[in-house]
Image: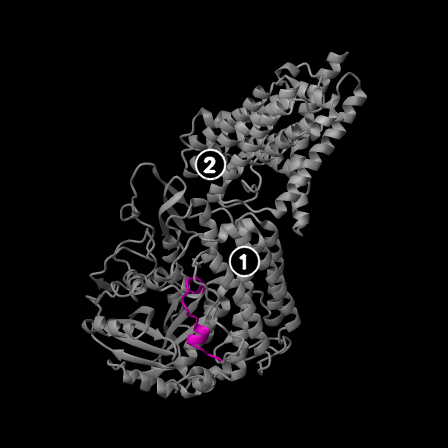
Amino acid sequence: MTDTVNDAIPDNVSGNGHHDATASAGTVTQPHGQPVGHRRTALTITPAQLPDLAAGLLSEGFRVALVAGHDDGESLRAVYLFVAAQPDRRVELHLPLEAGKPHVPSLAAMSFPAGRFEREMYDLFGIVPDDHPLPARLVRHFHWPRGWHPMRRDAGDPPGFGDIEGPYPFRTVEGHGVYEIPVGPVHAGLIEPGHFRFSVVGETILNLKARLWFVHKGVEKLFHGRTPEEGIELAERISGDTAVGHTLAFCLAVEDALGLDVPPAACATRAILLELERIYNHITDIGALCNDVGHGILNAHAQHIREQLLRINAHLTGHRLLRGAIRPGTANLRQAPDLNQLAAIATDIDDIAGLALGHTVVRERFTGTAILNNQQAADLGTLGYVARASGIDIDARRDHPFHRLGPSFAVRTHTDGDVLARFLVRAEEIKTSVAMIAELLDDNLTLTPASEPSKHTGHLEVRAGTAAQPRSGVGIAEGWRGTITHRVELDTHGVLTRVKVVDPSFFNWPALPVALADTIVPDFPLTNKSFNLSYAGNDL
Amino acid sequence: MTGVTGALGAVLQVAVIAVGSPYLVGAMRQVRARLEGRAGPDVAQPWRDLRKLLRKESLTPHGTSEVFRLTPAVLVASTVLVAAVAPFLTTASPLDPVADLFAVVALLTLGTVALALAGIDTGTAFGGMGASREMTITALVEPTLLVAIFALSVPVGSTNLGAIVNSTLHDPARVVSPVSLLAAVALAVAIIAETGRLPVDNPSTHLELTMVHEAMVLEYAGPDLALVEWASAMRLTVFLGLLANLFAPWGIATGSGLAGLVLAVIVFAVKVGLLGLLLAVGEVFLAKLRLFRVPELLAGSFLLALLAVAASFFLA
């Protein structure tokens, strides 16, 4: 089933083929179950077996990529997805749970992200993590009643906002001269809602609590009952600035579930789209970082470049934010990107980054500001450029590839973990992305001029017809913010029954308050921008 | 006759500064926008904004006291008074005796302190935060202003600003003396800090947590906000006008004659416009200092002012 997918990835990058991956999984002390998808094995276990299995996987270098609750009608089910890199391995642990009394042992002690997933799973499904060190609500809206779990099948429509469960549990910091600054959730400027509570002495931040979760949209539930084709429009809107990243992860998951064959030309086209999205978002933030230290001229130029890139996007795909280009089984560009134009833009971006770093005050503001050290970044399970700026070598383009990587690809890491390191990682990634696009242009691409509307649905339906049993699939893609993971389940008719979306922001948000300890209040906006986490992708 | 043109000059000073200052702000924004490659709003935009705000209803937050309500008036009144007495267009103003160095700096400080108190009065975290930062900066700026102008008054033997200006007119060589140059630099830095320009404060930011001046006025709306904005623009003009006339007073009307007054208006507009232009151009190349670096900058400017005073005694 998965061989066809594997064929799209030449052996020299994917390391072991699918069967080898199964074999390598078999060499470890714990067998990880039956192969169920691309480099993926699944094991159905009882809750009591979970801690030992999880500990074994984590010690083998796996990380918790996704934990999702499922409501199967008469019973509940928790799915834990662990992934490891080099070679790409994915292990799923399925825990069937009694609907009346769903309990799982908490993994919070061994994995911080797992602890957060468990809280999410409790809020959405009522699956109780036993002995969780911080069993407070996470994603559930503050005004929704206790005991109402929106992802349950019998949840019904959202209840009206009712009485709140007492005050929000902010950590109180006491001492001489300590005061609190509440900011948000409504901010000046075009920012999504988030409330930040600073406990401050003088100008130094002692403690910061980021209270998010004001934008629950029920995206995951909206996927239910849609065909994969109908799911695309949702995937493109999970986080507006990550249309390609989320759509790609979603399509990879659907293709994994259906065993769809993706031609190499479509993979190359997707890889180009992914880098185009990375470039336009990185330059936007490079400009915004300069603006936040009051050096507006570089922001004006960065915005100018962003606009050029958005117009290129519109020219190539018909949409400025690259929507509509990726479909299950395929991808499409109206024409190949103009390399000279991109190279000129890359040179301009290089100039902007150089001017910013050559400005003593700008550099001074970036250097040493809001340090997230390597240990903290690793403990919190951070992803993307936040992790790479703290010296963690993680990048799904290499770790979970869907297409061959050329020699120009390199994972850009820095070790200082400050605003400067995050700035540098992103500036360097733009160069890498442009070089990657140049290489990818040598491949065959799937190009359809705008005048000929492409029809992909027939292709998918033919393949979907082979799906005679419920299937699941996992898609992992390196969006510009970091590793995006989607897990889908389809019923016998090829209709989505569950889609779990994990944006890297879910992993990275807890790192922001950690990095801000002992930073001064006026440096918060700069730090926040250097992380630039998604609210919409985080709160689904 | 001198008295009449002098009085006319004083009235004209207020009128020119009151009407012209929003245009100065608009021109500086326009210059900055052009240098950044943007079209930018029209020069008259600050006036349009003021007109819009003045038409809105007046709102004050719950729990605020008279301090909050009176501050816009205090701010405007103190600035208008300085605009009337200090030698901007004429040295023959009948109010000239009031234009004492200490009185003028005290009047300008009164506005700053009133605004800080209003910030605290709102009871919001931002107001208090802005007021705290503003006081940190003011504590270093006001002594610098005093000492720098004092250095200029030493050779003249008077702390009257009109006398200092007249003396410079009669002895132009004094402008290039070490005393004058040191004082000019100290005063320029102090003025940049006092008017909330880069690299001390970023007047165009929307980030509440980084604000100094803007954080104190966040709770103002409608006509009150218009007064605060208008007073800010006038203060900028007053400070730049003082800087211009203390170090390059040529063109100011000294005696009777309407022609001299008309010329003075034109020269004043050109001088302040040039300084504003210089400030706007400079800001394009600057970035905002880390908050804790600001005292270092201001301490440096205070040191220059102190050196200017020392030099005025030793070199005189």
Separation of marks 2 and 1 at Cα, in angstroms: 28 Å
Q: Disc 2 sits on a residue from what chain?
A: B
Q: What residue is at 51 percent from the left and 26 percent from the top? A: B71
Does label 1 lie on the same chain as label 2? no
Disc 1: CA contacts within 10 A as few (<14), some (14-19) or many (>=20): many
Which quadrant would residue A502 be assigned to in this image? bottom left
Q: Element type at marker 2?
A: helix
Instruction: Give the residue type at disc 2.
Output: Arg
For the magenta stretch, what is the residue range?
A: A385-403
Report whether residue A462 is seen: no
Give the percent coordinates (x, y) of residue B256. Answer: 78, 16
Give the percent coordinates (x, y) of residue A350. Answer: 60, 62
Task: Please name the residue that numbered disc 1 is placed on.
Answer: A286
Left or right of B307 in this view: A16: left
Q: Is residue A402 magenta?
A: yes
Left or right of A36 in this view: A135: left
Task: Please name the residue that numbered disc 2 is placed on.
Answer: B133
Give the percent coordinates (x, y) of residue A345. Answer: 63, 65
